[in-house]
Image (spheres, rainbow, N blue to C red):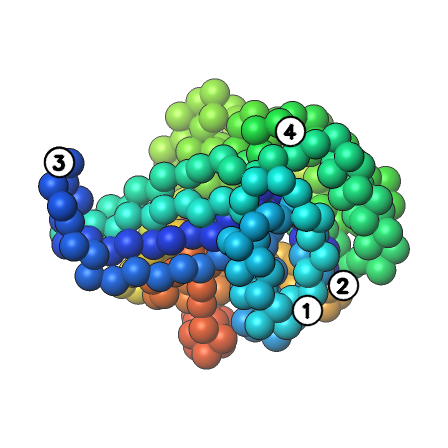
Amino acid sequence: MIVTVTANTTLDYTLFVPKFEMNRTMRATGTTYSMGGKPTDASWILGEIGIPSLALGFAAGHSGARAKAMLEARGVTTDFIEVGGETRINVVIISEDNKGHSTITTSSLEIEEQHINALREKFLAALDGASCVILGGTLPRMMRPEFYTEFVALGRERGLPVIFDADEPNLSAGLKSRPTYIKPNRDELSRLTGQPVQSVDDAYRAGRDIFERTGTCPIITLGGDGALAVLPNRAYRIPPLAVEAVSPAGAGDAVLAGLAASIERGQPVEEGLRLGIAAATAVCLMPGTADCRRADVERFLPQVELLPYPG
Ligand SMILES: Nc1ncnc2c1ncn2[C@@H]1O[C@H](COP(=O)(O)OP(=O)(O)OP(=O)(O)O)[C@@H](O)[C@H]1O
Ligand SMILES: [Mg+2]
């Protein structure tokens, strides 16, 4: 079983407006609720493509119940710890004139020490039947980045592959425990290394350096420029598929899902990268964060190319 852990569970509320303008009333041309929060996004995507997973983490209130129901509707098993406050509702605004998208995040879950202890217990119990773990995302206000140092280590100590996706300062904290994969996008990689990442070659050099230092394989996504996978003795550039993106939000989380799927099925990582990028492309077609259709994933799968890099 694939186990996903989301401390900061989220629903995304996406609003499409013809043109985003300050000090104006704007009429949304479309609205949609979907999942948010990277590991739950990956569970939701895995559910759509027919692969079961167990979603752990913290949830609260009406939005928590709604996130749970949305996951279960896709066959995901959920076992969240009920905490105080509310599962977050983040707002994604897509301006149709230039296809720009902006996100406003919130912080509304209230976590106490006892909740973290309860999550640790559930996580350890779940590891017994796990094929791999997906961890990541932001943390509720009262939680420290060291949460990721500990939870990545718990998975690795059991000999399980850990797929970890977070921005700084959480990324550095989790990386200390040497996850199997990290999946930074361009900005996250820049913030991690303190260097600008513009070209594919910048990404390759930064990714290879991370691998040499930690043994962790960076799967770097570059939005509309595709992706670069840095593996122990090889690397691949993965060109983007030509699609008219409606909303790319959550596309990166499809890559987490693809990697986990290949581990669960005992396939080489190359299969996981293909499935991940096919699912990421399918996510771009849907208005909701991390939403995709299985038929699109299957249609894109044979189109994904892994090109050895650097040539
Ligand atoms: N405009 C686009 N056209 C084609 N493919 C895209 C586009 N945007 C994203 N993708 C695909 O989705 C993958 C992941 O996207 P991206 O780098 O935006 O992830 P991300 O920033 O982690 O996203 P998120 O954090 O919202 O999940 C890319 O590697 C690419 O294959
Ligand atoms: Mg991402």
At horizontal 30% and vertical 64% (from top left) the residue drawn is 243
Mark 1 vs 4, N-terminal side: 1
Amino acid at circle 1: Pro
Q: Is residue 126 above or below residue 70?
A: above
As measured in the structure, the alpha-carbon distance from the residue carrying label 2 to the one carrying label 4 is 27 Å
Residue 85, percent from left and from top: 57, 40
Left-right relation of 180 to 227:
right
As measured in the structure, the alpha-carbon distance from the residue carrying label 4 to the one carrying label 3 is 35 Å
Q: Which residue is mark 1?
A: 52
Within-10-Å neighbours for mark 2: few <14, some 14–19, many 20+ = some
Q: Which residue is mark 3?
A: 23
Residue 15, percent from left and from top: 28, 54
As measured in the structure, the alpha-carbon distance from the residue carrying label 1 to the one carrying label 4 is 29 Å
Mark nearest the camera among 2 and 4 is 4
Mark 2 vs 3, N-terminal side: 2
As measured in the structure, the alpha-carbon distance from the residue carrying label 3 to the one carrying label 1 is 45 Å
At horizontal 79% and vertical 42% (from top left) the residue drawn is 118
Mark nearest the camera among 1 and 4 is 4
Amino acid at circle 4: Met
Q: Which residue is mark 4?
A: 143
Assign a secondary structure to mark 2: loop
Q: Which residue is mark 2?
A: 1
Mark 4 vs 3, N-terminal side: 3
Within-10-Å neighbours for mark 4: few <14, some 14–19, many 20+ = some
Q: Quadrant of the N terminus?
A: bottom right
The number of numbered discs placed on residues in the rendered structure image is: 4
Mark nearest the camera among 2 and 3 is 3
